Amino acid sequence: MTVKAKNRRTVKQKVFTVAASLSLLVASMQPALAAIEIDETDFGPSYETMVVDTVVGKPLQLVTAVAGTAAYLVSLPFSLIGGNADQAQQKLFVEPWDAMGRCLGCTVAEDNYYKSQVDNNNIIRIVVDQPSEILINTNDYVVVTP
């Protein structure tokens, strides 16, 4: 085999490798670009997830919340010195107790969906293009400029 033939083969292999890599990259990006649609007829917790959450999940969340509260109280002098008491409170105290308020058997996404459907007088809902919407909390300072 001549040197020219070997060079052509390596160039063809490189081109094929680049093309295959690009096609795999594009194929793997397709699900990330897809919109998530919620099928409300088959959405929400099932019997099994509710039972498991009742027997295992909520007791573990309670233990985690109590342990987080204790850790927050122990770490409070150090976090005050370090200037991150707010972050410690959020991670060790607020988030574990908020997790206890999640609906029984729901994933975080399901719980957020159900909570977004509850009427709140402080929230203004603007439907842009069904099902897209903009939520504005009127408790916050909102500036709208043209």
Image (cartoon, rainbow, N blue to C red):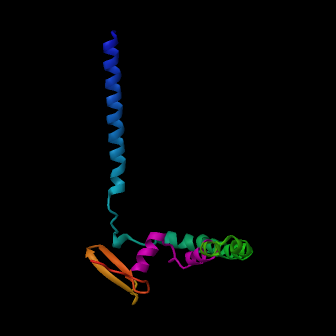
Q: Is residue 62 above or below residue 4?
A: below
* Quadrant of the rendered image containing residue 61: bottom right
Identify which residue is drawn at 37% across, 48% down: 28
On screen, residue 135 versus residue 85, left or right, reads left
Residue 133 can be seen, yes or no: yes
* Quadrant of the rendered image containing residue 84: bottom right
Q: Can you name the residue that lies furthest to the top here?
A: 1
Residue 107 can be seen, yes or no: no
Q: List x then y, in percent, for residue 21.
A: 36, 38
* Quadrant of the rendered image containing residue 127: bottom left
Magenta stretch: dominant secondary structure: helix
Foreground residue, 135 or 80? 80
Q: Is residue 5 above or below residue 58?
A: above
The residues colored magenta run 91-117
Identify which residue is drawn at 32% across, 30% down: 16
Q: List x then y, in percent, for residue 15.
A: 32, 30
Q: Can you name the residue that lies furthest to the left here?
A: 129
Magenta region includes residue 111: yes
On screen, residue 53 versus residue 81, left or right, reads left
Q: Quadrant of the C terminus?
A: bottom left
Q: List x then y, in percent, for residue 76.
A: 71, 75
Q: Quadrant of the N terminus?
A: top left
Magenta region includes residue 95: yes
Q: Is residue 14 above or below residue 124?
A: above
Q: Can you name the residue that lies furthest to the bottom here?
A: 121
Identify which residue is drawn at 40% across, 88% down: 122
Q: List x then y, in percent, for residue 88.
A: 64, 72
Foreground residue, 98 or 91? 91
Identify which residue is drawn at 26% across, 73% down: 130
Foreground residue, 121 or 87? 87
